[in-house]
Amino acid sequence: MTPPGLLGAALLFWGWQTGFLAVGVVMAALVEGRHLVRSRWDLSRTDFNRVSDLSAVLLVLIAIYQFVGTDAARAVLAILEWLPLTVLPLVTCQLYSTAGVVDLSIFFWSLRRRANEHPEEPGWPIDLTYPYVALALLSASAANVRTGAFFAGVVALAGWALWSARPRRYPAAVWIATLAVAVALGWAGHVGIAAAQRAMERVAQSWLLNLIRRDTDPFKSSTALGEIGEVKLSPRILLRVESANGTRPPALLREASYNVYNAPTWYAVDAAFISVSPEADGATWKLGPPVPERGRVTVAAYLRRGKGVLPAPSGARQLDNLLVVELAKNPLGSVRVDEGLGLVRYAAHFGDGTADGPPRTLDLVVPRNEQAAVERAAAQLGLAGKTPEQAVIAVRAWFSSHFRYARFLGARPQGVSPLEDFFFRTRAGHCEYFATGTVLLLRAAGIPARYAIGYAVHEWSPLEGRWVVRANDAHAWTLAWVGGAWREIDTTPGEWISAERETASFWTPLGDLWSWATYLFSRWRWSEREDRLAGSIGWLLVPLIALLAWRLYRRRRVATGAARGAAATAPPPRPGDDSAFYLVERRLAQLAFPRAPGESLVRWLARVESARPPAVTTAALPALLALHYRYRFDPAGLGAAELTELDTGAREWVAAHDMGGPDMAPQAHQARGATPPSDSPGQRS
C-alpha cells in the first residue's frame, strides 16, 4: 500500500498537467479520505468483478466520446489522459475494502472462470495503489506539457514512492545519491533523444525538398490538367460560414497561393512559414498591418489531428476567437495551424487587398513548355498594349464568351499540352484550367499573377441558418497585381455552381442532417479549450460511484466502524496469539522476506534459508519456531522457562537485525482485534 498522501498527490499532479484540476481534487479527496473513514466494505470477489466491469464500461464510453469528432491519433492521447478516471472505481473499492487488495482474476475472464471452478484456491492478490500512481504519471505525460515542471513533478512523486520502499540496510545518503544520478541520466537522455529527433527531422525534410525542388516549400497543389475522365468531389460539408449583420459573406475563401507552375503542379517557392504570436488574450492573431475593415465572417472548420490550413477571405488581417497553440503564415497568404483542436471557430476581419507579400520575379514567369500557347493566346487578345485593368477585362471576357465549364475531360491529341488543348481546341474545362490559363496570360501581359485555391461560398442552409461549404465547392482562381494591390480574378464560368449542384444525390439531405448533428456535437466537444468541457465527464463519475456505494450498502456489505466492530465481532483470543515469534515474522517481512498468502511458517522459513541473505542469520530460528509451534498447538503449552527462552530469543534476534524502526509488540494483534496470520503446520503452501 502506498504511503499516506502519495495517491492524492499523484492525482493532483495529473489534474494539473492535463487541465482537469477540479476533477483531480475530487479524486484525490476520495482516495485519501480512507485515512479519515474507519469503516470498510466487506466486498466479495463478485463485487470486485462488477466494479471491474464498471471501469471497463467507463473506458468504452470515454473512447466513443473521444473518437467522435476528432482523429484517431488525438483520440488515443485523450483516452490515455482519462485512464485514471476509468480505474478510479476499482482503486476506491480496494482502499475501502476489508481485504485491502484485489484479485488478479477480476481483469481476465479466464481467471474468473478458474476462480469460480476452484473457490478453495487462494487466488492472486495484488495491490493496485503503486500501479495507479504510475498510471497517473503516464496519463499526465499524454498532455504533453513541455516544461521542466512536469519532469520535476515526476521525479518528486517517483522519489516519494521509492523512498517508502527503499532497502533499510543502506544509509539514506547512499539512496539519495543514487536517485540523483538516475535523475541526471534521465534528464540527459531526454534532452539527447529530443535533439536526435530534431536532427533526423531536418535531414529528412532536406532530403524530401531536394527531391521536389531546391528552396521550395513542401506545400504544393497538384491539378487535374490533362487527366482523362470526370472530375468528381464529395458533397460532404467542410466549412460553415456566418457573416456579420446578416450580410452575404465573401464569395471566395482562400487557403493557399502558389507562384511556380510545372505542369500539372503549382508550387509555393520561397514561401517559408513564420510564427505568429497571439495577443494578450491568447485567441487574437494579427496577420498584417491594420486597414479599414470591409467586413467580418465567422468560419467553422475541422482540423485533421489539430493541424491544417485555415480558409479565410483574401484580405483577412486579423483572426479572433481562434483557440490554437501555434499559428504560422507565409508571404503568399497561407495561414497554417500547427497545433490546435479538432474543430476551430474563428472570426476573420478583412479589408481591401491582401496581406500577401509584394510581387517578385517568379510572379511573371511563364513555363517554357507553355510559352508558345500562352503567347499565341495573348497575341489574339492583344494584351501587350493594354493596361492591367484592360488586360483583366479582356481575359475575363474571352473566357466568358468563348469557353464553357466541363467536368468530363476527353483525350487530347499527342504532342499538345493540356493548356494548349484548352485554349484552342476544347475550350472547356474545370476551374483549374481557367485559373491556370488566367495566371499565365496575365503574366504574358507583364502583370504579376498567382494561382490561388480555396472554396466558393454560395449555398445557404435553411436547416442550419448559415452558409455551408462542401468539398465539391473547392475552387481555384487568380490573384493579379492591379492598382498596387493583389486582386482576386475568377474567370471560371458561373455555370460551374449549377453543374456541381446537379451531382447531388438522393441521400444528400440525410448526409447534411448527420453532418449538422456531428458539427453540433463537435462544437460542444471543443467549445471550451477542452478542459472545462471534458471536465464535465469527470463529474459523471460521482453519481456512478454513489450508485455503486448505495447498492453495496443495501446488500449489507458495508462494515461497521472499527470501534463498534471490534466490540461486536472480535474473535475470541487463541492460545499463542501473543507469541514473540511474530516479532521475527514482522522483521523478516521488513527485510524483504514476507510470507506469501497461504504459506506455512515451516515452508516460509525454509525459503528464507535457501535465499541465503547476507544480512540475515537464520541459525537460531528453527529452534524458536519449534517453541512457537508448541506454544500455539501443544495442549500442555510451554513452561515458564521455555516461554522465557522463546521471548528472549526472539527479541535478541530482532535486536540483532535492528532497522532503526520500532518493534511491533506481540500484543498488537489482540489490540487491534484482528487474527494473526495462520501458522498451522498443515496450512496449504
Image (cartoon, rainbow, N blue to C red):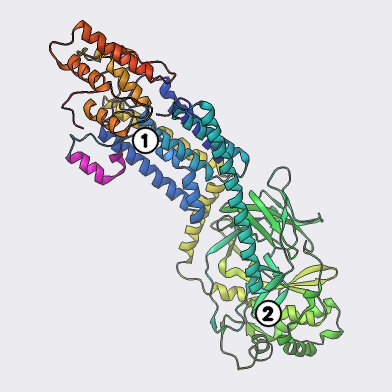
Q: Is residue 115 magenta?
A: yes
Residue 474, given in percent of the width and then of the height, sits at 61, 69
Decide which of 612, 223 is in the foreground and name it. 612
Decide which of 77, 234 is in the foreground and name it. 77
Q: Within 10 angstroms of label 2, few (less than 14), some, or many (20 or more) residues?
A: few
Name the residue furthest bottom.
414
Residue 488, quarter of the rendered image: bottom right
121 left or right, relative to 192: left
* Quadrant the N terminus occupies: top left
Residue 425, quarter of the rendered image: bottom right
The kind of residue tagged 1 is: Leu
Please give the range of residues in magenta: 104-117
Tag 1 residue: 90
Main SS of the magenta part reads helix
Question: Nearer the N terminus, badge 1 or badge 2?
Answer: 1
Tell me, for residue 262, which label it has, or none: 2
Name the residue furthest top.
640
Residue 263, given in percent of the width and then of the height, sits at 66, 81
Q: Is residue 39 magenta?
A: no
163 left or right, relative to 320: left
Decide which of 37, 128 is in the foreground and name it. 128
Relative to 650, say whether 470 is above or below: below
Residue 397, given in percent of the width and then of the height, sits at 75, 82
Q: Within 10 angstroms of label 1, few (less than 14), some, or many (20 or more) residues?
A: many
Label 1 and label 2: CA atoms lie apart by 62 Å
* Quadrant the C terminus occupies: top left
Secondary structure found at label 2 = strand
